[in-house]
Image (spheres, helix red, strand yellow):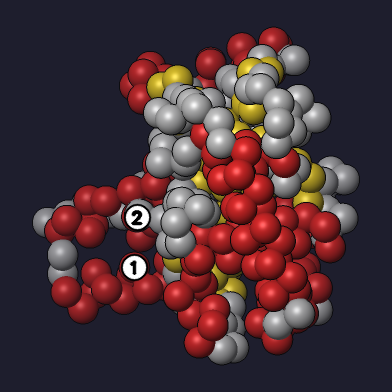
Amino acid sequence: MAASSKTLTPGNHNLTGDWTIVLPRRGKQRRKVSKILTPEQLQQQQSWVPTDLETDLDRELKLMRKMQICMKKLESSQFYHTFLDQIQNSQLSNCIFRVVGSELRMHMVIYGIGSIEAYEPPRLQLSLAILMKRKLNWIGDIEVFDPILSATESRVLVALGCSVLSVNEQGRRQALKPTLFFMPHCEAELYDNLLQANWRAEMLNHIVLFGNSFESYEQYVSEFKSSAIVDSAKHILAVQRFTDEFRINTVSDDYFGAFHDSSWHIFNLDPGTELQFIKSQ
């Protein structure tokens, strides 16, 4: 774990248990990260706990049933089989394994998942991430964060095998090792924060990103000449020419809301590449 300092982890919690906060085990790695992060970035990372700490077992069990139904529905869908086929049997597969390199697995970091209790699209997105981990042996542990997560949602996430961050990283996790960032339908600023925190060729080359199409951001800026979008997406626009993007096929309307305009992004930069970003006029 690169930039996070605390997590709620599987193995330390169940649907009737209490919260357990786990500190990082490798102090040397944490010191290494603190040398790379700027003071401004460190200040933006704030401790976080859900605002509703009361437990409600019935509510948790109801949400767990919703997640199980959602995963079962997704796993049997044509969308899921098309999605897996793209990962396993296309140029995308070669790009992913280029990033994985000599590592056995890469962590998955999920930012901005939204409320899995209130809405189906976040449940579908989380279901896809969990099914990917179960199916693909190159995906390691899953860490999740969204500031709107409730205690109930956090406990269910842990019961599903995920770790819930207790630090709001503002998307600024540094990819010191190959890392999959799963960020469907996040705000442009969150993608931009991630890119800014990894604004070196060697770190960008460690990233596999699943999220909003960067090509769509570029097309929007070209069409509408919006300085506000340029300011919030300046690193997105600048890295576009170094990006291999693979759009996914939502196949049916059932999955359009959760995954429309989503793409895989793999960065391919030569060592020593000088990175700049586009400024608004």
| Residue hosting label 2 | 188
The residue sitting at 51% across, 46% down in the picture is 111
Quadrant the N terminus occupies: top right
Q: Mark 1 and mark 2: span between their CA atoms?
A: 9 Å
Which secondary structure, mark 1?
Answer: helix
**Three-letter amino acid code at disc 1?**
Tyr
Asked if residue 99 lies left or right of residue 111, the reply is right
Q: Position of residue 22 (x, y in %)?
A: 68, 18
Asked if residue 138 is positioned above or below residue 12 in the image, the reply reads below
Residue at 45 percent across and 20 percent down: it is: 47
* Secondary structure under the numbered disc 2 in the rendered image: helix
Closer-to-camera residue (156/161): 156
186 relative position to 128: left or right: left
- Of 62 and 169, the residue lying toward us: 62
Between circles 1 and 2, the one closer to the viewer is 2
Q: Is residue 42 above or below residue 95?
A: above
Horizontal side, residue 39 vs residue 241: left or right: left
Residue 252 image position (x, y, % from top left): 56, 89
Taking the image as drawn, is residue 22 in sight? yes
**Which of 91/57 is in front?**
57
Residue behind mark 1: 217
Q: Is residue 125 above or below residue 165?
A: below
Amino acid type, mark 2 = Ala
